[in-house]
Amino acid sequence: MDPSPFTLDLALAEAMRLDAARNRAGAASLLDAALAKNEKAPAALRFRASLLRAELAADAGDLIEARGRLAEALQIRLDAKERAGLSAEARRADDLETFLTHRGCAG
């Protein structure tokens, strides 16, 4: 699927659909392209997309990639309102970080 016509919000929705359909490689590829082309997207949206990309890498067993993607997500500056709206995602990020740390991939 050509990600070029997708804004990051549409690409994230499609990646979530692909992930649910167990096409994790397709979801990862779509997010890679969309994140690269939408660097100026809202921070909360970039965080959500980056977190999903990290989770996809972990699911694929690529723990080094997962750690790098998670680090990218955690470096995104979020204001208080954005953080409040991402509490579930923040918990997922914490869980993923714990998983990666216990797998000996703390970097």
Image: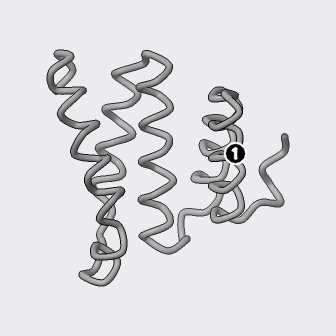
x, y percent for residue 66: 38, 30
As drawn, is 77 to the left or to the right of 42?
Answer: left
As drawn, is 55 to the left or to the right of 87?
Answer: right
Q: Amino acid at mark 1?
A: Arg
x, y percent for residue 37: 65, 57
Give the colour scheme of this rendering.
Answer: one colour
Quarter of the rendering occupied by the N terminus: top right
Check disc 1: other Cα within 10 Å, few if <14, some if 14-19, many if 20+.
some
x, y percent for residue 18: 70, 38
Quarter of the rendering occupied by the C terminus: top left
- Vertical side of 25 occupied by 15: above or below: below
Quarter of the rendering containing residue 83: bottom left
Q: Residue at coordinates 71% horizontally, 62% vertically from top-left?
A: 10
Give the residue furthest to the bottom. 81
Q: Residue at coordinates 64% horizontally, 62% vertically from top-left?
A: 8
Residue 107 appearing in the image = no
x, y percent for residue 74: 28, 53
State the residue position of label 1.
17
Task: Give the camera-side residue of 18 and 76.
Answer: 18
As drawn, is 102 to the left or to the right of 87?
Answer: left
Q: Residue at coordinates 50% horizontally, 66% vertically from top-left?
A: 45
Residue 3 appearing in the image = yes
